[in-house]
Image (spheres, helix red, strand yellow):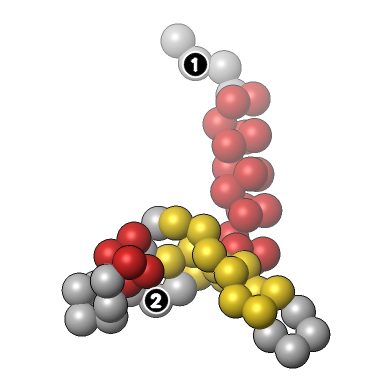
Amino acid sequence: MIGARAHGENKVYRYYTCFNRAHYDTTKRDATRINADAVEPAVLDALASFHATPTD
């Protein structure tokens, strides 16, 4: 997955997309785009939780 953005009329939309879809075309990969603003807080929370939990 790579980060990308699209410019709307009043806003910049950030998303993650498949490398093949971004650099070639949709026939190589039909994966959907993931909204960056929706997924990043969940990823950061998961990382913080993982690193806060002691392991052997």
The answer to whether residue 8 is above or below residue 49 is below
- The residue lying toward the viewer, choosing from 10 and 56, is 10
Spot occupied by residue 50 in the image (x, y as percentages of width and height): 56, 31
Q: Which residue corresponds to mark 1?
A: 55
Q: CA distance from mark 1 to mark 2?
A: 35 Å
Q: Quadrant of the C terminus?
A: top left
The answer to whether residue 40 is above or below residue 31 is above
- Mark 1: few, some, or many residues within 10 Å (few <14, many ≥20)? few
| Secondary structure category for the residue under label 2 | loop
Amino acid under label 2?
Answer: Thr
Q: Which mark is residue 32?
A: 2
- The residue lying toward the viewer, choosing from 42 and 53, is 42
- The residue lying toward the viewer, choosing from 51 and 29, is 29
Residue occupying image coordinates x 49% and y 16%: 55
Q: Quadrant of residue 35?
A: bottom right
Name the side, left or right, on which 25 lies relative to 39: left
Residue occupying image coordinates x 32% and y 71%: 21
Spot occupied by residue 1 in the image (x, y as percentages of width and height): 40, 56
- Mark 2: few, some, or many residues within 10 Å (few <14, many ≥20)? few
The answer to whether residue 53 is above or below residue 10 is above
Amino acid under label 1?
Answer: Thr
| Secondary structure category for the residue under label 1 | loop
Disc 1 or 2, which lies upstream in sequence?
Answer: 2
